[in-house]
Image (spheres, grey):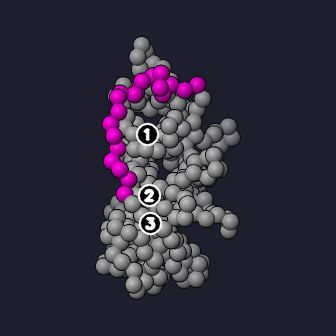
Amino acid sequence: MRNALMLGLTLASLAASAAERWTAPYALEDQQGRTFRVVLGAKAPEDVASRLEFMTLLGKKDLATARFQRVEAVCTDLCDSGRPTCHTVGVYTQEPGTGDVGEGLAALPGRVEGTLSAPLPGKPEKAPTVKQWAEKEFQVPVDESTPATPLPEGLRPLAYRWVPHGDASAVLEERQGGVDFFAPPFQLTDCRQEQQPPFTRLTCPGASLLYAKQRLLFASFAEYAEPTTAWVATLRSGVQEVYLVRVGLKAQAVPGLLFRDGERWRLLIRPADYPLLC
């Protein structure tokens, strides 16, 4: 049941308006020296040479601007089917005078000014308790995404809550599927809790959930890949801080941009360009 729902809720990129400062980051497929291959998707955007002439590369050491060179098609026979699956990459080369960014993490469209730093390691805390985590209301993760196809009538976005179960534990409940949505259910007593300010992470066998205090930001589950809610780097641009994260989807992890916008959290994700499922 859960796999069918998740397949029906494949993420699609939410285009940012002209007034938006931030947009979803692009994944990097490869790098050779100062040349990087940026995953553009199944097809390259129209007028890619002008619309995406520049990318800001985010690396473990620093960030740097790179200029578009060309588009290349990459085809792979994922499941020995005899029908290759193809996607496009944009080849970008760092501009002269820019420094070594180290291992590439992601790319942001345009020229972005700022500094990049690694987050402090997470600090383990006491075991999570029912009193701390049990909720009456379901929480919808903050990723700004839309289903590839319209949701069936009466089906709402996936939402979760911890509900008391037994004398001293809680289980994770999904709004549409109830406590039986997960088989076996996720038990709070099996989870570890750690602080990585401003975030709190619950890591359970087969699941990882990232919170800002008690607000669920996103949840990742073991499907065909490991669950991932990794905070990779912090970008400080002007007076704003934004967080580069790795978001574990059904079949692979993708980069995301997590930040505060007034009173709400936002998470911008660009979906994987092709499925990795046979």
Q: Residue furthest front?
A: 239
| Kind of residue at badge 1 | Thr
Q: Earlier in the sequence, mark 3 or mark 2?
A: 3
Q: Where is residue 92 in the image (x, y as percent from the top left)?
A: 43, 80
SS majority, magenta: loop
123 drawn magenta: yes
Quadrant in which residue 201 is drawn: top left
| Kind of residue at badge 3 | Thr
Q: Where is residue 13 in the image (x, y as percent from the top left)?
A: 57, 60
- The answer to whether residue 180 is above or below residue 261 is above
Q: Position of residue 94 (x, y in %)?
A: 41, 81
State which quarter of the image contains the C terminus: bottom left
| Kind of residue at badge 2 | Thr
Q: What element carries label 2?
A: strand
- The answer to whether residue 220 is above or below residue 146 is above
Tell me the residue that label 2 is attached to.
234
Front: mark 3 or 2: 3
Residue drawn where x is 32% and y is 70% of the image: 102
Q: Give the range drawn in magenta.
A: 118-136
- The answer to whether residue 149 is above or below residue 37 is above
Q: Can residue 269 be seen in this view?
A: no
Q: Which of 107 and 184 is in front in this view?
A: 107
220 drawn magenta: no
Q: What element carries label 3?
A: strand
Task: Tell how many labels.
Answer: 3
State how far apart marks 2 and 1 are (Cα).
Answer: 16 Å
Mark drawn on residue 115:
3
State how far apart marks 3 and 2 are (Cα).
Answer: 8 Å
Q: Residue furthest top?
A: 167
Dot 1, how many residues are within 10 Å of its Cα: few (below 14), some (14-19), or many (20+)?
many
Tell me the residue that label 1 is attached to.
200
